[in-house]
Image (cartoon, rainbow, N blue to C red):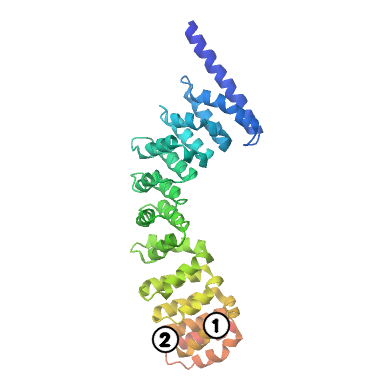
Amino acid sequence: MNARARRSCFSAVAVGISLVFVSIAVSEGSSESDSDRASVPALIKALRNPASSRDREASAVLLAQMGPSAAAAVPALTRALDDSEWQVRSASAFALAKIGSVVATDREAVGALIRVLSNSRDRVEVRQAAAWALGQIGATADSLPALVSGLQDANWTVRQACARALGGSVAQPEVVLALEKALSDPEDPVRQTVAWSVSQMGPGGVEVLVRALVHPVSDVRQTASQTLRRMGPPAIPILFRFLQDLEVSEELRQRVTEVLGLIGPSAVPELAMALMDKASTVRETSARALGEIGSHVVNHNEAFSILIGMVNGDPAWPVREACARALGKIGSSKAHPALMRALEDAQPEVRQAAAWALGEIG
């Protein structure tokens, strides 16, 4: 071994030993400790080590573990996004993400992440990490176009990463529109992530989900419904606004009542209003939803009283049948007189429902 080779070997060993001690310091200390910050220069040096890609990757990983304490390493990590090894590029993007919002003020770092995301020739893992980093540091006016464009990437995992990153952005019209289109993505994980992202964007985003309840593709409808259900009570005012809008189609109003039923007891007042909708299908769906909510409805006098009145008085027999079954599931003896009268209904389906409900109430 010649002198130059020995020096390279000793240098690599020295860097490796340094990384071991730095790793111990990071794992034993808190992420905001002085010892962490003192370790940053050594890790930056290792990140530039041309002899070992493993050392460079390990350095980026350790800097990621330090989080905001590693802010001084942002320029070095930015340069490492051009590393010849994809593992180093990916780890560096991950580290920038973990350092957080301070990176958003570094135009060079943001620009480098955008270039990585937009480079279709780079590894999927690297581009995913870049998209995630742009989301973690906070989507900016510079990065939004790249993330929106990424929603149409050929690789679905990159599309999903871009959708996730946009979830923390401001609900700008072009972003909301792009996400609304992305709800039709052929991959379910992408649709689920898009739905989550728009649910984080306030009323404008929630409206996207409500409109998707009548999407021609059943999987999209299901994704929208599930997301609105998980949102729970915060979604109710926007759902109710669609119920009140005379321009909204009957089909959409019916879907809205279904979702309100899935949300549960908090939506009972809105479902009571839906019982008076002009469309019998909406009234029927609302009655069935109240039945699924069950005994909680008794505590809402208006909803319970409307059901009792409609079991005998609604002009559409499917609504009367739905009201009878709902009263049976609610289980209050106060419904006895109305259900007894329903036993004489002209429609056999209503009479059968009334008899079943009386048996349930006992």
How far across and how far down the image is residue 296, in percent?
Answer: 59, 76
Residue type at numbered disc 2 = Trp
Mark 1 crowd level (few <14, some 14–19, many ≥20, 10 Å Cα): some
**Residue 296, visible in the rendered structure:** yes
**Residue 362, visible in the rendered structure:** no
Mark 2 crowd level (few <14, some 14–19, many ≥20, 10 Å Cα): many
Give the SS element for disc 2.
helix
In depth, the one of 244 and 216 nearer the eye is 244
Circle nearer the viewer, 1 or 2:
1
**Residues tagged 1 and 2 counted as in contact (Cβ below 8 A):** no
Identify residue for label 2. Answer: 317
Q: Residue at x 44, y 64 (%)?
A: 225
Q: Residue at x 56, y 92 (%)?
A: 337
Instruction: Please tell me in which quadrant of the rendered image residue 331 appears.
Output: bottom right
Figure check: 140 above or below 228: above
Numbered tag placed on residue 302 in the rendering: 1
How far across and how far down the image is residue 249, in percent?
Answer: 35, 73
Q: Residue furthest top?
A: 2
Numbered tag placed on residue 244 in the rendering: none
In depth, the one of 156 and 77 nearer the eye is 77
Q: Give the Cα distance between marks 1 and 2.
A: 21 Å
Residue type at numbered disc 1 = Glu
Instruction: Please tell me in which quadrant of the rendered image residue 28 appears.
Output: top right
